[in-house]
Every structure is written in structure tokens, then in C-alpha cells.
């Protein structure tokens, strides 16, 4: 796939063209957790979407992931350090579940409340 | 060369080998002495347990049982050549000799422990040659002193070769001496032949600085001292001496036309310093830069190197990017910066970088047709300066540099040695009207550094309570326990998103060992043990963050640590997989629009180390370590580390098997 294609796809997604097919109401956080593992998102983002300076360029996915449309657009079309996932490999419903899972993760503690981070 | 050398006349009683053996066989059959009384008579190494009942007794056994005086066993007709070799080695002040024993160097092995009293060097029993070289690698990075290792013929050297490659890429001296039975007409038939080669050093020639095959004892003395000298002249590197089995067993005799054997004196070679004109030009560029950046990889060879780098950075108020080959620059310093600092630089000085190109280019593994693409980080006007001793010693076949990077001023010189003159030249070159701007740059760096620290702490708090345990939590729980020690992070073979670098006050050269050099996995565990050995002698506390995949290449090094009473705390970053490769297969699956087949594991088939899960704590325990695990609950980690610390302080190594997040 060319980079031009990704750019086009990103534009298309942002305009909601393809997302219209996604069953928005069915998003399920429990199923999303399983999908997050199955499709390998955990590998670079950690099982709680916490990210890593090394494998996700420090990007944190939870608990406030990008809005679903932008989120999906990125996952489908990224031409940066993350490999893109097409619908052939990752169906829209599963991606919506993943988004629901990430949204369901509790907010991180303030580091000031953690003694080990204040020594 | 197992030549038969006639015994010199003054070398003790001549013994006919055949008759002697017949004699002892008869004596052995009638043997009556107990092993205890044999030991009392001075024979060594004989115990009842070692006496094979169904086999003919060996000469030593017979001597033990009959009380035959040891001198009567002297079959070699004089002083053993390998005793002289030990005399040579002793002049080089080498403290340890980690090695896996082998027949091809039995001569020198025997001399080292019996004639040399197993001191300077002390033989450390290793279970794999890769571990032995890895230990020497780690030891050097703490002490700045090389170790010697002996390895066996073809097969031992093949085992050692990955570790030698790591040492080569990491510019670390290791003196490798390999046994080899060269004389095909005399060597024993069978296995010794398979384990010998005509030019055995060829196996590692591409990634050693020098090698030799001495053919006489005098030649050995010269080659050993030369090997040591070459390996210890920056750029450091491993060297290889092939040691003929026959030469070890020959008697000492005068060399050539009667000259007595002598041992050449070792005098260190001073390190190469940058040309004074080039230093002045570089200083001018740096002094007048708007945004100078210093990038270092193996620049600090010692604590003094760290101090000099701080001086240079402060003189310029230039940010320093540490690539991590060594602990070059204090992470707590306001000028310590991440790689993106390079993007805004107008002058970059790179010191002891094996790969300047990689510093000034980014690579994204997501290009057209799944092939990655590069992007420069440089502005078209950015000037580049390089001080790199490796320019003096480049080889062709194996390359640890990528594309060719043109630089404006290149000095083939040792950075640490060049720094004093560079600092003076920079001070002289700073125009008065730039001083205020330099100070302002420092203020901005202080602010950026403080902000980055805040961000790091907040990032560490994310998934703080997760199970598997986050790598930030793992790192900080360790820190919470070691912070009052004189500590040394002896390896970080587990990739924990650099949390110790980001949050521990890593300031001294010995606080971190640096990377492996060649990224040959399996380096972490032995390097950690070698460094812990050095730290033990210096009274320091060693801690290692141990990867699971790394440990499984040659876990026998755990036994070596226990055997030789090398205390260290090993906390495992057990993410239960070859995680780097796991991500690679996932990436390719995504490129190809496929769902990676997991086969019941967490990662793509062939990348997980689970089902069954390896019980590393039991593995370690079986080899003499105190160990606990698997620890999956973050709340239990701190107390477990505390318990383990007490064990380590009592002198025993301790391991915690912790299930962790991937990175």
C-alpha cells in the first residue's frame, strides 16, 4: 500500500465514510479487552494501553483514547511507527470494542500520591 | 604441535613411558593405600568417589594408592612449557580467568591451578564459553581491566564467538586463548582432530583486533604481551591467541641458538589524541553555535570521562544525548537530553559513536511495500564533528555502522583523551558577546529538563497497579530498596522502557554498564555476573534487570555466580516472550492484512516463552541461588526485593521471577 493511499484513507475515515458501517452501539469493553490482546495492540501499548517510550513513542491510549473516528482513522492508515491494520485483519466491530475497552480503563493515579515516585 | 622433544639432561629422572605404565598398572592392581593417606602424602585430586571401579587406574590414582613420589611421574623431561606460560600471564596482572575446561588446554590449565596456585588469574568454572566471554565483558566495564579466557578448539571458540562479537562491537578488550592441537601427525586421534583447525583464529579474525598462533614458548611470551597491549590501546577490542596443545606440554628449553627465555615488559600505549588544528576548528564551531548538541556513545571510558563531558557540556551549556554504550553523562544533569535534541541542533559533536548516521536519521519500519524509510533529522546547514577512535580500526566483513555519514570535521582519536584539549580550546574560542546567550541556553535546558522529569513521573504512574507488573513499577520498586547502597545496574537485558535512566539518579560511570555492543542476546546474564564479580571486590551492590529470553541462552552462568560466591540481585523482567521478535511478526501480519496466528499463546507462534511457563526461580534455586516467584502482584514486589536484598548482603546471589508488562 502506498503512503498516498494512507492519506486518502485517513481523509475518508475522518469524513466518516467507512465508519458508517461500524455497529457503534454494540461496542463492548470486555470483548474489547480480548480483541486488544488478540490483535497484538498490547504488544506495543501494554495491556492497559499505558504505552512505552520505546514501542509506542510514549503515546498513551487509555483512559481517554482519541475519539472513535480519529482513533479508527489512525489505526487504519498510520504510516508512522505503528503498522496499519486493515479491515481485512481487524473488523470495524472489534476495533470499536477495543475503543470501548480503552475508554473503560480507570484514570491513572496522580504520581504525587505514589511515594515511590516522590523520593 | 605435539612434537616429541628430547628431555634435557638436568631435568630429572628419565622415564620410559611404556615401561612406566606397565609398572604402575601392576602396582595399581596390588594397590593398598587409602585415598586419605595418599592425600596425606601430597598427591592431589584423588578421592574415593572419583575412582572408577571397572576401568584401569590412572597414573595419578596409582601414585595416590602406592605413594609414588610426584617427581617420578614427571614424564615431560623438565619444566612444563605451560608453567612458563603461567609466568608470562602473571606479569599481566589479570585477576580472573572465567573458562569452560577442555582437553586442548589441559597443559596450561594444570599449570595455572597447580604451579600458579590458582591466583592472578583465578580460574572461574563456567558452563559455556559464551558465558565466560560475557563475564569478561561485564568485568571490564566496571574495572577497566581485561580478563583472560581459555576456550576449547573449534567447538569452544564457536560457542564463544557471539560473545566475542559483542565485545568487538562494544570496544571491550578480552584476551581469548584457545587450545588447538595443530600437529596432525602427532595429535591424538578422534575428537582432538575434530576440535582442531589449521587456522583456528580465522573463525573470529573479522571481529578481533589481532590474533596470533605462537609456535614456541618465546613466541608465546611475545604474543601474549603484544595481545594484551593491542587489546588495551583505544579503541579497545578482543584479541585471540591460539595455543598449541603440544607447546603447552613440551618442556621449557632455551630458545633458538641457546638464548634464555624472557618475558617482555608490558608498557601501556597512550591513547590517540585529536589533531590540534582539528580540535581548534571544532572548538570554533561549537563556541559560535546557537544550538550545539553533544552526542556520546562510548565516550566516557571511566569516571574521569564523565567528569570531562560535564565540563564540556557546562562550558557550552550544550545538551548531551547519551546513546547508552556506557554511562557517559549524569541523567540528573539539566543538560542531559533525549535524542530529539538533535533535531534543532546547528552543530553536533559525536563522540565514540559507532554509527553517526543512525544518530542523525530516523528510520520508520512502515514504508511502501512494507520496507522502511529514513528521514534526516538534520537541517541542511547543520555542521557535524566526530571524534572516534574506531576510525583507526575498521574492518570489512562485519559492520556495526549503517549508511555512510559525511561529517565536517572528523578526528580519528580517542574522545576521553581529546576532551581536555577540546575543553580548553572551547573556553578560548567563546566570544565575549556570546556568553549571555550561552547562559540563557542553560536556563532553557534547566526548564526543559525539569518538565521532562515531571512528564516521566506522571507516565510512570500509569498502570502503576497493573498485573503483569508495569516496567515503571518494577524499576521504582527496585530503586526504593537499593537507593541507600553504592549501587551498580550491571545489566538491563530486559527492555524496561529506560525507566532506570529516566527516574533513577544515574550519575556515576559504574551506575550503568551500557549496552551489549552487538545486541547478541544472551549477553545480559553473563555480563551481569562478570560486573557483579568486579563490584564484589569493590564492595558495591550489583543489581540486574534480567530478561527471560536472554537468560535462557546459557543459564548455567547462574551456577558460576553461586559457585564463586558472587552476590547480586537479579530481578527478572519476565514478559514471557521474545518480545522484539513478537512485535516484528505482528508488524508483518499487519502489513499483509492477516491476523497473527497465536497458537494458544499471547504472541505469534514461535515468539512466546509460555505454556509451560519457565519457573526461573526454581531454575536459579537449583543452581545455588536464593529465589522467589513468580511475582504477579505489584504489592508483593517491594517486600520480596527487600527480602532478596538481605540475602545478597549476606553474600549469596538472589533472583526474583517477576511477570511484567512487555516493555
Image (cartoon, coloured by chain):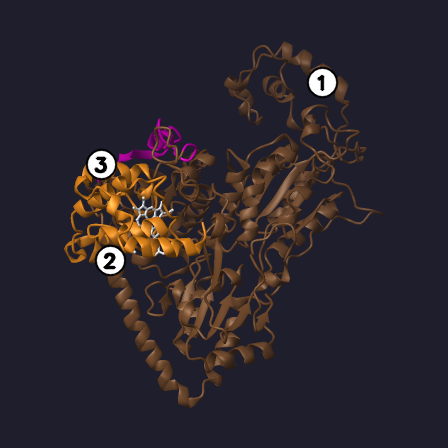
Chain colours: A orange, B brown
How many callouts does the rendering have? Answer: 3
Circle 2 sits in a helix, a strand or a loop, which is it? helix
Residue under pointer 1: B21
Q: Which mark is residue B457?
A: 2
For disc 1, the chain is B
Name the quadrant containing residue B434: bottom left
Would you say residue A13 is visible in this rendering?
yes
What are the residue bounds of the magenta stretch?
Answer: B605-633
Vertical placement of residue B573 versus B33, above or below: below
For disc 3, the chain is A
Q: Please state which of the two labelled residues, at mark 2 or mark 3, is closer to the viewer.
A: 3
Residue under pointer 3: A31
Residue B307, position as x, y percentages in the image: 42, 68
Q: Please state which of the two labelled residues, at mark 3 or mark 1, is closer to the viewer.
A: 3
Residue projecting furthest to the bottom: B433
Q: Are marks 3 and 1 on the same chain?
A: no
Asked if disc 3 and disc 1 are in contact, CB closer than 8 Å, the reply is no
Cα distance between the residues tagged 2 and 3: 31 Å
Q: Earlier in the sequence, mark 2 or mark 1?
A: 1
Is B618 within the magenta?
Answer: yes
Amino acid at each position: 500500500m502506498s503512503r498516498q493511499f494512507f492519506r486518502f484513507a485517513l481523509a475518508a475515515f475522518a469524513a466518516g465514510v467507512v465508519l458508517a458501517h461500524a455497529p457503534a452501539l454494540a461496542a463492548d469493553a470486555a470483548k474489547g479487552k480480548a480483541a486488544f490482546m488478540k490483535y497484538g495492540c498490547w504488544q506495543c501499548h501494554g495491556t492497559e494501553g499505558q504505552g512505552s517510550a520505546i514501542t509506542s513513542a510514549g503515546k498513551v491510549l487509555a483512559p481517554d483514547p482519541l475519539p472513535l473516528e480519529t482513533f479508527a482513522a489512525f489505526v487504519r492508515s498510520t504510516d508512522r511507527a505503528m503498522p496499519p491494520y486493515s479491515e481485512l485483519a481487524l473488523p470495524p466491530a472489534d476495533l470499536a470494542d477495543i475503543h470501548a475497552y480503552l475508554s473503560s480503563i480507570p484514570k491513572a493515579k496522580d504520581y504525587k500520591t505514589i511515594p515511590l515516585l516522590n523520593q | 604441535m605435539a612434537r616429541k622433544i628430547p628431555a634435557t639432561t638436568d631435568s630429572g629422572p628419565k622415564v620410559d613411558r611404556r615401561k612406566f605404565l606397565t609398572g604402575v598398572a601392576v602396582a595399581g592392581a596390588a594397590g593398598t593405600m587409602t585415598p586419605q593417606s595418599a592425600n596425606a602424602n601430597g598427591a592431589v585430586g584423588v578421592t574415593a568417589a572419583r575412582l572408577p571401579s571397572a576401568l584401569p587406574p590412572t597414573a595419578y590414582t596409582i601414585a595416590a594408592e602406592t605413594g609414588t613420589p610426584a617427581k617420578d611421574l614427571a614424564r615431560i623431561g623438565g619444566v612444563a612449557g605451560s608453567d612458563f606460560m603461567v609466568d608470562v600471564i602473571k606479569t599481566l596482572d589479570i585477576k580472573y580467568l572465567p573458562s569452560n575446561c577442555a582437553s586442548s588446554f589441559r597443559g596450561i590449565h594444570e599449570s595455572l591451578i597447580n604451579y600458579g596456585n590458582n591466583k592472578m588469574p583465578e580460574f572461574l568454572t563456567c558452563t559455556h564459553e559464551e558465558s565466560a566471554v560475557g563475564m569478561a565483558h561485564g568485568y571490564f566495564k566496571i574495572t577497566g581491566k581485561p580478563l583472560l579466557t581459555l576456550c576449547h578448539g573449534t567447538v569452544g571458540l564457536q560457542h564463544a564467538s557471539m560473545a566475542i562479537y559483542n565485545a568487538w562491537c562494544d570496544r571491550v578488550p578480552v584476551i581469548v586463548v584457545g587450545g588447538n592441537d595443530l600437529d596432525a601427525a602427532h595429535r591424538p586421534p578422534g575428537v582432538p582432530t575434530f576440535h582442531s583447525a589449521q587456522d583456528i583464529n580465522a573463525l573470529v579474525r573479522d571481529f578481533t583486533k589481532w590474533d596470533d598462533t605462537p609456535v614456541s614458548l618465546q613466541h608465546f611470551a611475545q604474543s601474549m604481551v603484544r595481545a594484551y597491549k593491542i587489546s588495551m590501546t583505544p579503541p579497545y577490542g578482543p584479541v585471540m591467541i591460539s595455543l598449541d596443545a603440544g607447546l603447552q606440554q613440551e618442556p621449557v628449553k632455551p630458545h633458538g641458538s641457546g638464548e634464555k627465555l624472557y618475558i617482555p615488559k608490558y608498557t601501556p600505549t597512550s591513547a590517540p589524541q585529536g589533531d590540534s588544528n582539528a580540535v581548534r576548528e571544532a572548538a570554533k564551531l561549537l563556541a559560535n553555535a546557537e544550538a550545539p548538541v553533544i552526542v556520546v556513545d562510548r565516550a566516557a571510558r571511566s569516571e574521569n570521562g564523565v567528569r570531562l563531558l560535564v565540563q564540556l557540556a557546562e562550558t557550552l551549556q550544550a545538551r548531551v544525548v547519551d546513546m547508552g554504550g556506557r554511562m557517559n553523562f549524569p541523567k540528573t544533569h539539566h543538560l542531559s537530553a533525549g535524542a530529539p535534541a538533535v533535531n534543532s541542533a546547528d552543530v553536533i559533536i559525536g563522540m565514540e559513536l559507532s554509527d553517526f548516521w543512525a544518530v542523525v536519521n530516523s528510520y520508520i519500519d512502515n514504508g511502501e511495500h512494507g520496507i522502511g524509510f529514513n528521514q534526516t533529522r538534520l537541517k541542511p546547514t547543520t555542521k557535524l564533528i566526530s571524534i572516534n577512535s574506531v576510525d583507526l580500526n575498521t574492518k570489512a566483513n562485519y559492520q556495526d555502522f549503517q549508511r555512510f555519514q559525511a561529517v565536517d570535521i572528523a578526528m580519528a582519536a580517542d574522545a576521553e583523551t581529546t576532551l581536555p584539549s577540546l575543553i580548553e580550546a572551547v573556553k578560548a574560542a567563546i566570544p565575549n558577546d556570546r556568553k549571555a546567550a550561552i547562559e540563557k541556553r542553560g536556563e532553557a535546558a534547566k526548564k526543559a529538563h525539569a518538565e521532562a522529569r515531571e512528564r516521566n513521573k506522571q507516565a510512570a504512574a500509569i498502570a502503576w497497579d497493573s498485573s503483569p507488573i508495569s516496567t515503571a513499577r518494577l524499576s521504582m520498586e527496585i530503586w526504593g530498596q537499593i537507593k541507600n547502597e553504592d549501587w551498580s545496574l550491571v545489566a538491563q537485558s530486559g527492555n524496561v522502557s529506560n525507566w532506570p535512566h529516566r527516574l533513577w539518579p544515574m550519575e556515576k560511570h559504574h551506575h550503568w554498564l551500557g549496552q551489549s555492543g552487538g545486541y547478541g542476546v544472551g549477553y545480559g546474564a553473563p555480563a551481569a555476573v562478570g560486573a557483579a564479580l568486579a563490584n564484589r571486590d569493590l564492595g558495591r551492590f550489583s543489581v540486574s534487570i534480567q530478561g527471560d529470553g536472554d537468560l535462557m541462552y546459557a543459564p548455567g552462568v547462574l551456577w558460576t555466580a553461586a559457585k564463586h560466591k558472587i552476590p547480586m540481585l537479579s530481578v527478572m523482567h519476565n514478559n514471557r516472550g521474545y518480545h522484539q521478535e513478537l512485535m516484528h511478526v505482528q508488524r508483518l501480519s499487519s502489513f499483509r492484512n492477516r491476523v497473527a496466528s497465536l497458537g494458544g499463546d499471547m504472541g505469534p507462534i514461535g515468539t512466546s516463552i509460555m505454556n509451560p511457563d519457565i519457573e526461573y526461580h526454581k531454575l536459579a534455586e537449583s543452581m545455588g541461588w536464593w529465589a522467589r516467584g513468580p511475582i504477579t502482584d505489584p504489592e508483593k514486589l517491594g517486600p520480596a526485593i527487600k527480602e532478596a536484598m538481605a540475602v545478597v548482603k549476606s553474600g549469596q546471589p538472589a533472583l526474583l521471577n517477576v511477570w511484567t508488562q512487555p516493555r
